[in-house]
Amino acid sequence: MHTPSFVPRKVTLAVAVTLAGMVLAACSSSGTSAATNPTAAATASSAKKGLTVYFIPKDTQNPYEVIADKGGQRALQELGGKVVISSGTADTAAAQIPSIQAAIQAHADAIVIAGNDPSALCPSLNQAAQAGIKIVSFDSDISCGSSPSHLFINQANTEQIGTSEVDLLANEIGSTGQIAILSAAASATNQNAWIGYMKQELTKYPNMQLVTTVYGNDDPATSLTVLQGLLSAYPNLRGIISPTTVGISTAAQYLDTHKSLLANLTLTGLGLPSQMKSYVHDGTVKEFELWNPDNLGYLAGYAAAGLASGSASTQTGSTFTAGTLGSYTVLAPTSTTGASVVLGPPTVFNAANVDQFDF
Amino acid sequence: MTTGHNDAAKGGRALWRGLVRWESALVIVLIGVMIFGSIQTPNFLNPTNFFYTGLNMGEVAIMALPLTLIIMTGEIDLSVASMLGLSGAVMGELFSNGWPIWLAIAAALVVGAIGGAINGVLVAKVGLPSIAVTIGTLTLYRGLALILLAPRTITGFPASLTQIGVVPIPGTEVAYSTAVFLALAVVTGIILHATPLGRGLVVIGLQPEAAKFAGIRVNRIKIWLYVVSGIVCAFAGILLTLKNASVSYDAGTGLELNVVALVLFGGVSIFGGRGTIVGVVLSVAILGTLQQALTQMNVQPEVQNIVSGGLLLISVVIPNSGEAIRRIRDRARRRV
Amino acid sequence: MRARELGIGVAIVVVFGLTTLNNHAFAQIASIQQLLSGAALIALLGVGETLVLVTNNVDLSVGSIVGLSAYIVGDLFKHNQGMPVVAGFIVAIVVGAVIGAINGLVTTVARVPSLVVTLAMLYIVRGLDGLLVNGTTIDPGSIPKAFTAVGYQTLFGIPWLAIIVAVVVAGAGYAMRSFRASRDLYAIGSNPDAAALAGIPAERRVFTAFLISGALAGLGGALFLALHAQIDVSGGTGYELTVIAACVVGGVAIFGGSGTVLGAALGAVLLNTINQALVASRVSSFWNEAIAGALLLTAIAFDRWLSLRVARSLQSAKGAHRAL
């Protein structure tokens, strides 16, 4: 990972000092800095006080999002505002709509939402935008066209997530053999976007063949069933990419307990270090990726506060400062995301660094 | 479905009195929930909240009406949410293939009728237990939606139609789906409480054998009830698709038990033969208002689950508690 | 009823054979082990559900019990390192039994339909689970290896999961045939009035059925945790309908009076075999659910056809007897 030399030293230093040891944080300030505006640091704390931001995660129990929500709370605490976390118990759009309504009724200043559905939330979010609420999405983007205008906090460049996982696996299996993807739900927007880029990247490896994609619905039992079926359907499988924390930990547990499979099979994907730690140390999994969900929520919190205060905008090329993470530049909408900022490149975890992370 | 003690013998009048009491209890609960909401959140009883509640409950509430009639006959339909998902998938798939929206909607309704007919024939003609059949079609219909749509999400429905999910009927604060629900409730209520057909449903539920001897065409009525349920659920699927301005294969997954809970909380007996549409409408109003109040108070959704489950439990225990206490006392006396 | 279990056994062999023709790897030992351990949990829940179903009741709370008991055990391991493995199983069973007892008490004392009681408990128990979990997870590192070993180790090539469940099925199957109290369950389900006249303490029997169903679901939670080595709030969600489907496929009458625990267990094996066969046959995973639904309907219809035939042949046998 190279660090562009034109990153303002001040920002890099601040990050290094406050989050010493957190490789991730350092990465995030450098990764997005292609067009970092050196004056950005000056506009640092222009957010209004007393802002109310509604965080609407996919559900209230998703461990990954619980960490992200805490990051958001941290951000608003620094800014003198408050976070209200509201969502349902099921990962459905219907369960999130009452929370959007509650934000409207409570005259919130901004909503930070992880979309359970790319489009089904648009009408409700439009209502919120019309009521003057700023919309930020994170984790899984919404695709509502131009209304409401919103800012997507991308955990990492979508293309990069897809391509880097393929590269990781290719590196481990010598770029040859059959591989498969163990995904979450077939309707998950972020998963499908990543898988699209994986397929694109695979054209670079003519000897690697993607045989199938199976869907474990982010449920350990379903993931296990489809994994077992996968293994008997493709006995020559060399690699599995599971770009979801439930999928990769289920697969890791299975491989860990069926060690003979490991001779020919390599697993990688996106996982939480806390869940994967033991599998990395006993050699079941060599490398996997993720970003820091706490920083993701923190960045989303700052973005929401910035939009609500007018110190940030969704204009391409505009910048804002996200506390200790440094300055971020808004990127133009692409085919898969709306206007966005990127937290940073994903971190690759292995036996050398996995113990340094507490999420 | 439970230790089959048949209450049919208790006679119409005593039964009617019990029902009236249950509905009055529901009215009191509804008022209580409204007061609770007003105390906890400022300006709770504003028109926008009424609109939101209607919007959120719409599809589930609409599906509860035909299910009430089915449960009245002692059967059940667990495929309602999958039927909703399948109809949305059919509508989305055809629309994305360039069909005019009205034709796509009509096709979705036809699929609903066919799906309902399959349930009805398997239950009434082949004589299979409805709970088993509709667990099967729950899986089948959702599976068909999966084949049709996954992993795509269809969007781009005409804005003139998707408006219904965002704005109330002009000049009011009534959601379109609320209006549909109320209209259907009136029709269902009249059918159930004021026609020979409705009385037939009650007899089928209370005494299926007697119903046959009385010349009621039990099988034909049941098949038609399932067909109607299929069509109404398909309609709910269309409404949901328009409200969300999009559809994916998993729309409405898992709602079936919510719909059943709604009907049962309305005082409809799971054994059939007992229940009123007024009770179901009140049940919709109570659970919808309660959910709205708890969400706006930012109560954890887990607590909302516990409250809904607790209400359902209380709703069946309290009407039976007098009798239960008498029984326990009798037993204690006998022991002495 | 023997023919019934044989029929499911044949169906399992046919599905297995056809899939193996298509993909020889399906007959590997590892693959067969997967078929057994994958079905074990649903089969275990099916035993309890069968006891409840034959009394013409139903238990919809089993999925929520699995989730709650798995989390409680996982949390205990996390905070008490060195807690004996056996204690984990005992706690799981006790948690399940307590909820089962509540189901049974409310159903019998208040004489409330069990479908409503257990539907309400489905929501309440899942809600309590959510409050306990509160967005945390139990990570593999905090569960003792000796506990998760139950989830994957084998004895003479048979997974421990399958052995535990087979012991439960065999024990329950023997009890259902040999003890009067268990035979009472069938009487209560098929003819409650006659059962009452015969002096069967229906309430106590139904209560016991719910208690056992809850306890087995609690044990299921421990096995879930052992198998997956992780648990969050979603554990066991939706199992209730899968379990009932397995029972129905296994020939347990939904309105009580007939069915065996062996049938239910075989039903679970059949459903799991079909699921894995579809993936192993490289059928697009989008087709799984529809095919599973169609097969379920076929199984129910076939069952009906079979029982009608049996009834007819019994009748004609009776007729022939009278003619003599």
Image (cartoon, helix red, strand yellow):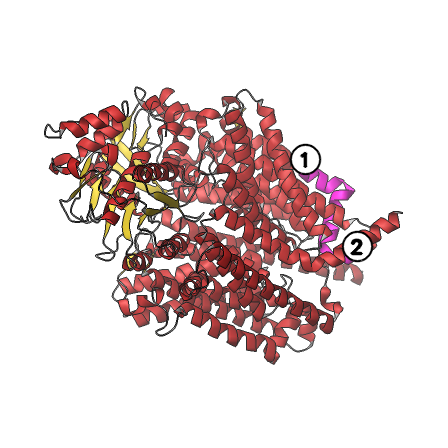
Q: Could you say where residue C92 lies in the image, as x and y percent from the top left?
A: 59, 33
Does C180 lie within the magenta span? Answer: yes
Q: On screen, B89 above or below C212?
A: below
Label 2 CA crowd tier, 10 Å (few <14, some 14–19, many 20+): some
Q: Nearer the viewer, residue C142 or A5?
A: A5
Residue stretch rendered in magenta on the structure: C172-195
Mark 2, residue position: B327
Q: Nearer the viewer, residue B195 or A216?
A: B195
Residue at 38% x, 65% y is: B238
Tell me the amino acid under the disc marked 2.
Arg
Q: Looking at the rendering, which quadrant does residue A177 occupy?
A: top left
Does B168 lie within the magenta span? Answer: no
Side of C231 where A83 appears, left or right: left
Element type at mark 1: helix
Label 1 CA crowd tier, 10 Å (few <14, some 14–19, many 20+): few
Element type at mark 2: helix
Mark 1, residue position: C171
Q: CA distance from mark 1 to mark 2?
A: 35 Å
Q: Chain of mark 1?
A: C
Q: Looking at the rendering, which quadrant does residue C171 occupy?
A: top right
Q: Could you say where residue C35 lies in the image, as x and y percent from the top left?
A: 49, 37
